[in-house]
Amino acid sequence: MQAMETITTECPSCLNPTKHNIHYSITKLDADLPYDYENTFSIIECNGCTNISMLYKVRDLKDNEIEEVNYPDAHLYKISEIDRFFLKPDVLKQVPKIIQSLYKEVKDAFNSQSPILSGIGLRTLVEAICIEQNIAGRDLKTKIENLHKQGFISNTELPLIDKLRLIGNVSAHEIKTIQISTLVLAVEIVNHILKSIYILPNINNQINI
């Protein structure tokens, strides 16, 4: 069995630098900025007090400078409670596979007690929907507006989807933990959009009168 990767960083509970096991880690380039930043988000566990926290690292690829922030996870939830917020597998299979995959990653982030990754994942889902629908734009805000202009979303849905973009920005750029109640509402928005763009048209095609 491969040994778990460890890192030494300050524990928010012990208030001292301690060794932590890295349970999960993901690295993303920040495509929204005109310069390159590499964002790494990790779920880590202190080897001393067993506190689980989120470690956020941002690296400036130009100057190779690294900033690091470690903060406690704000909420713990049972997986059984989380499942009810998400589309059931038989419903989800009606959307494109790339959307399915990202949607499952968002659900995994919820299950891993990671509100930061959840917020970023929800934003990425919106980006993926735009890409899958061949929506052009210099940034995600423009793509969302074009999604509306091309009739994929309504006037009512437009500001809702833009909220997902803002949630992702707050999670990634401002290093803020979004409240679970807000994230649950965001999942409901995603569910609604997936139904509107993919699932309901598919059902309509199956109804023969």
Image (cartoon, grey):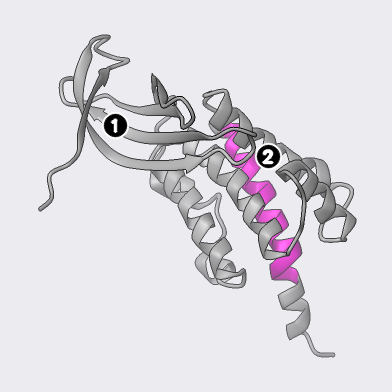
Q: Where on the picture, by quarter, is residue 72?
A: top left
Q: Name the residue at the top extreme.
A: 15
Residue at 62%, 44% in the rendered image:
123
Q: Which mark is residue 106?
A: none
Q: Quadrant of the C terminus?
A: bottom right
Secondary structure under tag 1 reads strand
Q: Quadrant of residue 67?
A: top left
Identify the main secondary structure in magenta: helix
Q: Is residue 124 left or right of residue 130?
A: left
Query: Residue 137 appears at what percent x and percent y?
Result: 77, 50
How many neighbours does mark 1 have within 10 angstroms: few (below 14), some (14-19), or many (20 or more)? many
Q: Position of residue 124 (x, y in %)?
A: 59, 48
Q: Is residue 179 visible?
A: no
| Residue in the image at 26% along x and 36% along y | 22
Tag 2: amino acid: Arg
In the rendered image, which residue does mark 2 sit on?
165
- Across and down, in percent, residue 41 comes to 41, 35
**Seen in the image, is 154 located left or right of residue 102?**
right
Give the magenta range: 181-200
Direction bottom: furthest residue: 209
Residue lying farthest to the left in this orientation: 1
Identified by mark 1, the residue type is Ile
Residue 59 visible in this rendered orientation of the protein: yes
Between discs 1 and 2, the one toward the N terminus: 1
168 is higher (above) or lower (below) than 126: above
Q: Which residue is label 1 attached to? A: 44
Q: Residue 32, image x and y in percent?
A: 64, 38
Residue drawn at point x = 58 percent, y = 37 percent: 183
Residue sitting at 16 percent across and 26 percent down?
A: 47
Q: CA distance from mark 1 to mark 2?
A: 26 Å
